[in-house]
Amino acid sequence: MSNTPHELAEDFPNDVDKIHELKVSNPHFAKLMEDYHEVNRAVHRAETGIEPVEQSAENEMRKTRMRLKDEIASMLAKA
């Protein structure tokens, strides 16, 4: 498992301007980003042992993070 945070700006370096634009102009996108960052931080804390959780809970958090990132990527592709 990676202990590196999955920051959106790092995962979508060519879309940083689009990310900012959508964040300020689209409430749904802003909420997706907020949810993504929240679950991403929780996964990172679990992976590093700061806040250990059951393996099944950590797996579910990863799936949620992936779903959110997929939706964010889809919205970026359409923008």
Image: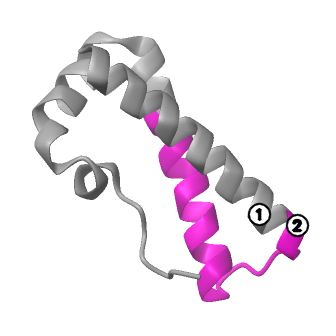
Q: Is residue 52 magenta?
A: yes
Determine whether 9 is above or below 79 in the image: below
In the rendered image, residue 59, in percent from the top left (x then y), is placed at 77, 63
Bounds of the magenta segment = 33-56
Along the viewing direction, whichever of 74 and 28 lies nearer the viewer: 74
At 67% across and 88% down in the image, what residue appears? 49
Query: What's the residue type where badge 2 is placed?
Result: Ser
Mark 1 burial class by Cα count in 10 Å: few <14, some 14-19, many 20+: few
Query: What's the residue type where badge 1 is placed?
Result: Asn
Q: Classify residue 15 as left or right of residue 60.
A: left
Numbered badge on residue 59: 1
Helix or strand or loop: what does disc 1 sit on?
A: helix
Quadrant location of the N terminus? bottom right
- Please give the count of numbered marks on the rendered protein: 2
Determine whether 69 is above or below 76 in the image: below
Q: Quadrant of residue 16?
A: top left
Q: CA distance from mark 2 to mark 1?
A: 5 Å
In the rendered image, residue 2, in percent from the top left (x then y), is placed at 51, 80
Determine whether 67 is above or below 75 in the image: below
At 26% across and 11% down in the image, what residue appears? 25
- What is the chief secondary structure element of the magenta stretch? helix
Numbered badge on residue 56: 2
Quadrant location of the C terminus? top left
Helix or strand or loop: what does disc 2 sit on?
A: helix
State if disc 1 and disc 2 touch (CB < 8 Å): yes
Q: Classify residue 48 as left or right of residue 13.
A: right
